[in-house]
């Protein structure tokens, strides 16, 4: 009987020692099961070509870690455009603040003087020598038209008798049309000067 008790005590001691030893081990506990993960789609606020992907699939990342890098060409162009617009706006602001430069003032004064001279000329109306010169131009155009008409009629008669080529006839017809257009232009200029400055021309010059 005592031997059995001793054996039972030894077994119990071994079990207690084994239990204590197992609790002191730091090996990870291996179990089987399923882990559910949340899938998040990551996007960019701007478009562009991907230059580099620092993070790989399955890698742990923190807030602020770069996931994708885009090529900077498009953004550099936009940056240069923004800088250019800023420079123009700054130049305009400086000009409004500091006033116009002397050359700008001189240019504006010269343009004003030209417009004022044109207005005075229109208000005064065409001079007699302008009308006389226009009349001479009209007389010259009419004389050239008469010569072109005589040449046209002569070649037309020859062409009807097959004594002139089609090219000759086409040429005199073209010269006659040019002479007629010149007479119309000179007549219109002469009539305009004789009539004087129109009211709408004065209003346009004053504006």
Image: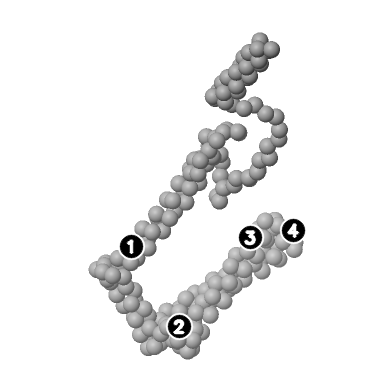
Q: Position of residue 75 (x, y in %)?
A: 48, 47
Mark whose residue sits in front, 2 or 1: 1
Instruction: Tell me the quadrant of the picture where the N terminus can be found.
Output: top right
Pointer 3 or 4: first along the chain: 4
Assess disc 3: are there few (<14), some (14-19) or many (≥20) residues with their C-alpha within 10 Å of its C-alpha.
few
Q: Residue at x 44, y 51 (%)?
A: 79
Q: Are marks 3 and 2 in contact (CB under 8 Å)?
A: no
Residue on which the image places disc 4: 162
Q: Considering depth in this image, is 189 or 160 the residue closer to the camera?
A: 189
Pointer 1 or 3: first along the chain: 1
In whole angstroms, how far apart are the C-alphas of marks 1 and 4?
A: 76 Å
Residue 171: mark in rendering = 3
In whole angstroms, how far apart are the C-alphas of marks 4 and 2?
A: 57 Å
Residue 91: mark in rendering = 1
Q: Considering depth in this image, is 158 or 124 the residue closer to the camera?
A: 124
Instruction: Tell me the quadrant of the picture where the C terminus can be found.
Output: bottom left
Q: Secondary structure at mark 1?
A: helix
């Amino acid at each position: 009987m005592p031997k059995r008790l001793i054996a039972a005590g030894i077994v119990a001691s071994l079990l207690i020692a084994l239990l204590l030893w197992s609790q002191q081990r730091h090996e990870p506990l291996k179990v089987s099961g399923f882990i559910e993960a949340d899938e998040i789609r990551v996007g960019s606020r701007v478009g562009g070509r991907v230059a580099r992907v620092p993070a790989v699939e399955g890698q742990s990342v923190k807030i602020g870690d770069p996931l994708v890098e885009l090529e900077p060409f498009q953004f550099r162009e936009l940056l240069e455009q923004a800088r250019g617009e800023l420079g123009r706006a700054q130049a305009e602001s400086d000009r409004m603040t500091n006033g116009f430069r002397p050359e700008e003032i001189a240019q504006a004064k010269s343009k004003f003087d030209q417009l004022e001279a044109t207005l005075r000329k229109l208000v005064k109306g065409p001079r007699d020598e302008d009308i006389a010169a226009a009349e001479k131009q009209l007389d010259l155009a009419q004389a050239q038209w008469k010569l072109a008409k005589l040449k046209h009629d002569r070649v037309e008669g020859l062409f009807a008798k097959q004594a002139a080529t089609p090219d000759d006839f086409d040429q005199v017809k073209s010269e006659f049309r040019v002479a007629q257009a010149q007479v119309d232009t000179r007549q219109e200029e002469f009539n305009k000067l004789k009539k004087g400055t129109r009211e709408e021309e004065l209003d346009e010059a004053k504006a």
